[in-house]
Image (cartoon, grey):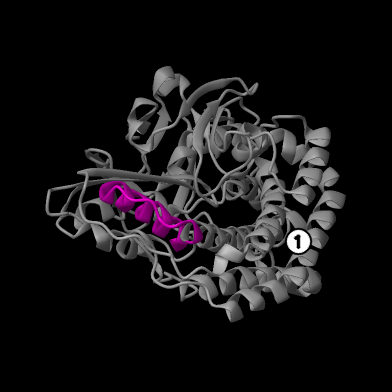
Amino acid sequence: MGRTLTIEHVTRIEGHARISIHLDEDGRVSSAQLHVTQLRGFEKFVEGRPYYEMPAITARICGICPVSHLLASAKACEAIMAVQPPPAAVKLRELLHCGQIVQSHALSFFHLSSPDLLLGMDADPAARNVFGLLEQYPELARSGIALRKFGQQVIERVGGERIHPPRIVPGGLGQPLAAEARDAILEQLPVARATARHTLQFFKERIESFSEQIEAFDDTPTLFAALTDAAGNVQWYSGTVRFADAEGNLLAALEEPAAYPSLIGEAVLPHSYLKAPYYKPFGLAGGMYRVGPLARLNVAERFGTPEADHELEQFRRRFGRRPRSAFLYHYARLLEVLHALERMQALLEDPEILSPRVRAFAGVNALRGVGIIEAPRGLLIHDYEVDPSGTVQRVNLIVATGHNNLAIGEGLCQVARRYVDGNRLSEGMLNRVSALVRAYDPCLSCSTHAAGLPPLEIRLLDARGELVDCLRY
């Protein structure tokens, strides 16, 4: 008889999930599944609200990346209003978004993944955390805290608050950037850039020791999807969604956000509340794709800023033009932090950044609006339908972790088969399986949004905790 190993709580991620590893009668891994066990339901309880409330409401989906939801939501509202924000507002939004990229990637790399990367996959789990990191690598740990703080301060100075910033509104921003706020960010930028350089160099010197993980962590060929501009530069706030295959061949370019259903299908899996988007022309079986930092580097030609482009060239010389290993998401995040800090510098030195004209006004001019941006973890889609009075009738959200759902599942199987021996278990084996999930930096609070009827499982356990019966519907 086969057995099932369960990692009840995947640690050091945002949200709640468990992993099931299925073993055959010889103790070998036959399959593995990620179960996302929380459900948010934002699509339903926003029905009946005025469309202009949507940015503030959907920002509450997540406390880690509220800026992403604010921006995608505001863009969807602006499609309903049929307006474009003033140029200064667009630049301020990009500046705000750069702040979020920095703080979110710093959280992922330093606080969630570095305990594995620096202390070791087999380290004592009681010390394999941010506190153990502070003890053994105090300077690096403090650098991570400082870099995240800097990103949050940028959000606060531009958006009004560090979490759920209130100044992002349909049509632009609620108020312009003050000169004092601009100067304060510029003053702190050199230290932040020095920290980013130092961390990247530190990681580059250690990465050879992870050659086994680079090989094992989800090397399956997949499609990739990301925003770029017409010149092929990485874009986070606006651009064209491009789908490319594992060799870099362009499959499709989505120019009009509202047309995304022609390229993206959505499936419901029987074992999770996390829906599974797929590239519709290839079908569910062949349409697995990835988004996020590594996908952005594989789709784009370059960053478009000198220091980040120099480091990207070194990355590609080392790992190839389109590397597939999910382990390299860590490396890609550090490159993106460097790029975000360079973009901040350019935006802050633009005189238009202090323009008082930061908001456009209009009413309902369309009954549907779709906003697409790149969240730190990948593509984020907000799709709203309203009635003529502007009351929300239908909402669909497709969040980065959802786009990666099928790829994460495939990666779990690959890593479990590589490391897990059902006849001789160790904590380090199971931690490597969890580390595959952490490489994608999933945000499960963001990602669990129903498509149709979500699967439900009721499990009946006896007093010893053993499964007596299970009802699925």
**What is the magenta segment's predominant secondary structure?**
helix
**Residue toward you, 263 or 307:** 307
**Helix, strand or loop for disc 1:** helix
* Quadrant placement of the C terminus: top left
Q: Is residue 325 magenta?
A: no
Q: Is residue 304 above or below residue 241?
A: below
Judge from the rendering whether residue 258 lies leftward or rightward of residue 412; answer left or right: left
How many badges with numbers are in the image?
1
Judge from the rendering whether residue 81 lies leftward or rightward of residue 408; answer left or right: left
Q: Residue at x 73, y 59 (%)?
A: 123
Q: Residue furthest right?
A: 205
Residue 255 in sight: yes
**Residue toward you, 63 or 340:** 340
Q: Residue at x 45, y 58 (%)?
A: 15
Q: Position of residue 33 (x, y in %)?
A: 47, 38
Which of the 4 image quarters holds residue 214?
Answer: top right
Residue 273 in sight: no
Which of the 4 image quarters holds residue 35?
Answer: top left
Q: Position of residue 86 (x, y in %)?
A: 43, 57
Q: Is residue 68 magenta?
A: yes
Q: Is residue 73 above or below residue 246?
A: below
Q: Residue at x 42, y 56 (%)?
A: 71
Q: Residues within 10 Å of mark 1 (few under 14, many from 20)?
A: many
Q: Which residue is mark 1?
A: 196
**Residue toward you, 33 or 286:** 286
Which of the 4 image quarters holds residue 107?
Answer: bottom right
Q: Residue at x 58, y 71 (%)?
A: 154
Q: Position of residue 150 (x, y in %)?
A: 64, 72
Q: Position of residue 348 (x, y in %)?
A: 64, 65
Q: What's the residue type where badge 1 is placed? A: Ala
Region rendered in magenta: 66-88
